[in-house]
Image (spheres, helix red, strand yellow):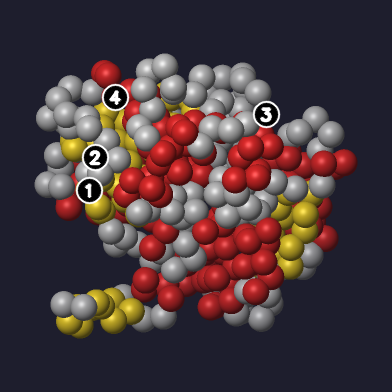
Amino acid sequence: MSEPHSPGGVLCDGVIGAIGRTPLIELRRVHTYPFRIWAKLERFNPGGSIKDRTALSMLAQRIRSGELVPGRSVVVESSSGNLGVGLAQLCAYFGLRFVCVVDARTTEQNIAILRAFQAQVEVIGRAEAPDGDFLSARLRRVSELVRSIPHAYWPNQYANPLNPAAHRQTMHEIATALDGNVDYMFCATSTGGTLRGCAEYIREAGLSTTLVAVDAEGSAIFGPPLGERLLPGHGASAKPPLLDGNVIRAHEVVRVSDMETVVACRRLTVGEGLLAGGSSGAVFAALEAMADRIPPGSLCVLVFPDGGDRYLETIYSDAWVRRNFGDIGHLWKTPPSKEDAPC
């Protein structure tokens, strides 16, 4: 628990006390739309992303109950990066061994951070997923490890109801800060935890918020993939169990290309001074795609899941951008027109 200390900050009981209560800032410089835009900056969680909330939710209850025992229990999970970092941080704090199964698209920065927390990292290469379905290959390896390691626990972020439960608090923080006046809420999708948790809060609180799910074009969550997905952490190669059936429905779905994500990230950096992560850029790109349909005077909230410091070799590398998309620097140096907007 944390308590007020001074106007300059709060006292926290260990790193877990610093998870949540992230800043909500208004974006004013990067757009000229007739509505207001607020961004929830989840990079300010101690592990650098919104996945800290998920990690804590999935571990804390089992630690309190004694099902996870420091020095004996082993946490095993599949992650594209950010949840792995969140779990590695908490396992180090609680004295639990952690094995993280990642894949070839996981950034070098995330792998380095995992190893800094003394996590055991297993990387699934392209040879183990020849069809490009890294998620299935990672889950197969997790299943093998859980069967072979004594006292292993798989949190299973893709189906664990404690994942969306964490994000009821995320939405509660937003609704409280804005007195419930949220007309549009934009959430990136991967496991579906943030989307489902926010949707459940919106419904139970009786808010009139329009919920917008943001997915990658190369993802299969809301339909067949429309190409390869270059950037990790946003989208998925299969619909996650947390979004199966009629459990939760977004009011709108916007699919964003990798190029649109890169342009949006770069525009946020030069326009707002925000080094945004890939999922964060995708959320901003989705808002821009919907802008013509948002009534003047509306209040829009964008959940920015992470920062851009782990994308320095991709989104923020000019060489990587040119190699994958060509010379598109003009698209973020000035606001794109209808003619310039990426297809």
* Mark 1 / mark 2, whichever is N-terminal: 1
Please give the residue where the numbered disc 4 appears in the rendered image. 291
Residue tagged by mark 3?
228
Q: Is residue 91 left or right of residue 202?
A: right
Question: Is the residue under label 3 in contact with that under label 1 (CB below 8 Å)?
Answer: no
Q: Secondary structure at mark 3?
A: loop
Label 1: how many Cα within 10 Å (few below 14, some 14–19, many 20+): some
Task: Name the kind of residue labelled 4 in the image.
Answer: Ala
Q: Residue at x 63, y 61 (%)?
A: 109
* C-alpha gap between disc 4 and disc 1: 16 Å
Question: Label 4, label 2: how many angstroms apart (C-alpha)?
Answer: 11 Å
Judge whether 253 appears above or below 166 on screen: above
Contact (CB < 8 A) between labels 1 and 2?
A: yes
Task: Quadrant for the N terminus, please.
Answer: bottom left
Q: Three-letter amino acid code at disc 3?
A: Glu
Q: Earlier in the sequence, mark 3 or mark 4?
A: 3
Q: Position of residue 101 (x, y in %)?
A: 72, 55
- Give the mark, 4 or 2, whose residue is nearer the N terminus: 2
Separation of residues labelled 3 and 4 (CA atoms): 26 Å
Identify the residue shown where x is 38% and y is 53%: 274
Mark 1–mark 2 Cα distance, whole angstroms, equals 6 Å
- The answer to whether mark 2 and mark 3 are in CB contact below 8 A is no
Say few, some or many: other residues with alpha carbon within 10 Å of mark 4 (under 14 / 14 to 19 / 20 or more): some
Q: What residue is shown with label 2?
A: 37
62 over 30 or under it: above or below: below
Tag 1: amino acid: Glu
Q: Residue at x 45, y 43 (%)?
A: 265
Residue indicated by mark 1 = 26
Where does residue 49 sit, x and y in percent of width and height?
46, 57
Task: Specify which label sits upstream in the sequence, 4 or 1.
Answer: 1
Q: Are marks 4 and 2 in contact (CB under 8 Å)?
A: no
